[in-house]
């Protein structure tokens, strides 16, 4: 089949990350016999400055006709772009792998390999906030049974392919009703997976143990805001947000992007770490292969992640992780590790 993939360069370092990665994006399908069409579309701060809107209708129309989207980071319009896309396309599962890679500056831990699965459509990120008086602000936290059930089930299904352990993170001792519902549903669904062990942990304790004992985790499942915070914290373990990819997954569409922001302070310098975007592309090809039963796409995604590992192990790294190479040099080193690749 032919995969149609939308590309959103984004803002800041996003266009640079995408530009240096395009050789990989074009070569990889050819190496694995895949038929892929890329279509670049606009969204983000630059788009809003030029067109008056951060997420125009023509971009949305192309996304609706695509199988997946690979997106660079956006800046101040993030809520208008990624938050809106998550809700419009019902991208309910935010999946963030946290994995150690060999880098010049030793990471805090070299033995990290777990995944944070975060509910992606509700919680306080629904943006339902207002002022009751000039001095009192109210923010509504939405936690629904439907959203809890599907994110917890996603986490358990993922754990079945890994080490068969799920840690459900909440704060039900304080938010007894909203997080109480999340915890209750998690326990109920856990009974459907007798081979997967269930651990519950309050979010403050989880923040502590992520740093002190990350090997205890396999799959962490949590609500939207807790997952957002914990995944950025967890990225510190592996040395840089520049090594942190993510997926926003729905039933029929998925969007893949780096975890980090658009880093305007280093934009244009040619030193942005491309690994987060390339690893996001790896996740994309694996998802496409599994969603549409295309084994070659799964193989391409797995091998792309291995190519990142192998390039880093040979010292090809950007300055954020102690290296001396440019964004393009790192991307080309990764490309050279793909089997059958020729310059």
Image (cartoon, rainbow, N blue to C red):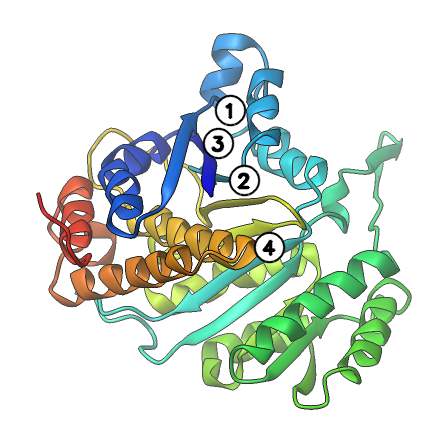
Of mark 2 and mark 3, the one earlier in the sequence is 2
Q: State the separation of the CA atoms marked 1 and 4.
A: 20 Å
- The mark total stands at 4
Mark 4 vs mark 3, foreground winner is 4
Of mark 4 and mark 3, the one earlier in the sequence is 3
**Kind of element beneath mark 1:** loop
Of mark 1 and mark 3, the one earlier in the sequence is 1
Mark 2 Cα within 10 Å, few/some/many (few <14, many 20+)? some
Q: Is residue 160 above or below residue 145?
A: below
Label 4: which residue?
94
11 left or right of 304? right
How far from the left and from the top, in percent, is residue 33? 31, 48
Of mark 4 and mark 2, the one earlier in the sequence is 2
Mark 1 Cα within 10 Å, few/some/many (few <14, many 20+)? many
Of mark 2 and mark 1, the one earlier in the sequence is 1
220 left or right of 145? left
C-beta proximity under 8 Å, tags 1 and 4: no
Q: Is residue 13 above or below residue 197?
A: above
Q: Quadrant of residue 189?
A: bottom right
220 left or right of 326? right
Label 1: which residue?
43
Of mark 1 and mark 4, the one earlier in the sequence is 1
Mark 2 vs mark 1, foreground winner is 2
**Label number found at residue 67:** 2
Camera-nearest residue between 193 and 289: 289
Mark 4 Cα within 10 Å, few/some/many (few <14, many 20+)? many
Q: Is residue 26 above or below residue 260?
A: above
Mark 2 vs mark 3, foreground winner is 2
How far from the left and from the top, in percent, is residue 103? 21, 65
Q: For the C terminus, give its image quadrant.
A: top left
Label 3: which residue?
75
339 left or right of 48? left
């Amino acid at each position: 089949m032919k995969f149609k993939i939308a590309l959103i360069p984004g803002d800041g370092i996003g266009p640079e990350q995408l530009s240096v990665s395009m050789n990989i994006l074009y070569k990889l399908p050819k190496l694995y016999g895949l038929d892929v069409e890329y279509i670049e579309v606009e969204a983000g701060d630059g788009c809003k400055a030029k067109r008056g809107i951060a997420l125009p209708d023509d971009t949305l129309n192309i996304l609706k006709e695509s199988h997946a989207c690979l997106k660079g980071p956006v800046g101040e319009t993030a809520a208008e772009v990624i938050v809106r896309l998550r809700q419009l396309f019902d991208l309910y599962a935010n999946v963030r792998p946290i994995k150690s890679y060999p880098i010049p500056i030793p990471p805090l831990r070299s033995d990290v390999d777990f995944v944070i699965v975060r509910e992606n459509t509700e919680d306080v990120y629904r943006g339902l906030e207002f002022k009751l008086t000039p001095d009192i602000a109210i923010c509504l936290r939405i936690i629904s049974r439907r959203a809890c059930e599907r994110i917890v089930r996603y986490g358990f299904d993922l754990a079945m392919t890994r080490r068969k352990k799920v840690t459900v993170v909440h704060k039900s001792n304080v938010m007894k009703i909203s997080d109480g519902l999340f915890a209750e549903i998690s326990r109920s669904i856990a009974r459907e997976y007798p081979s997967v062990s269930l651990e519950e942990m309050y979010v403050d304790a989880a923040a502590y143990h992520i740093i002190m004992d990350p090997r205890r985790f396999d799959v962490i499942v949590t609500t939207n805001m807790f997952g957002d915070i914990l995944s950025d914290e967890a990225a510190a373990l592996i040395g840089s947000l520049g090594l942190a990819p993510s997926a926003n997954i729905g039933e029929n569409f998925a969007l893949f992007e780096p975890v980090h922001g658009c880093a305007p302070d280093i934009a244009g310098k040619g030193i942005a770490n491309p690994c987060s975007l390339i690893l996001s592309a790896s996740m994309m090809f694996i998802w496409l292969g599994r969603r549409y039963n295309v084994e070659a796409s799964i193989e391409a995604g797995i091998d792309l992640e291995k190519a990142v590992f192998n390039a880093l192990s040979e010292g090809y790294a950007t300055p954020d992780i102690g290296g001396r190479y440019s964004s393009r040099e790192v991307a080309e080193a990764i490309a050279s590790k793909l089997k059958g690749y020729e310059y």
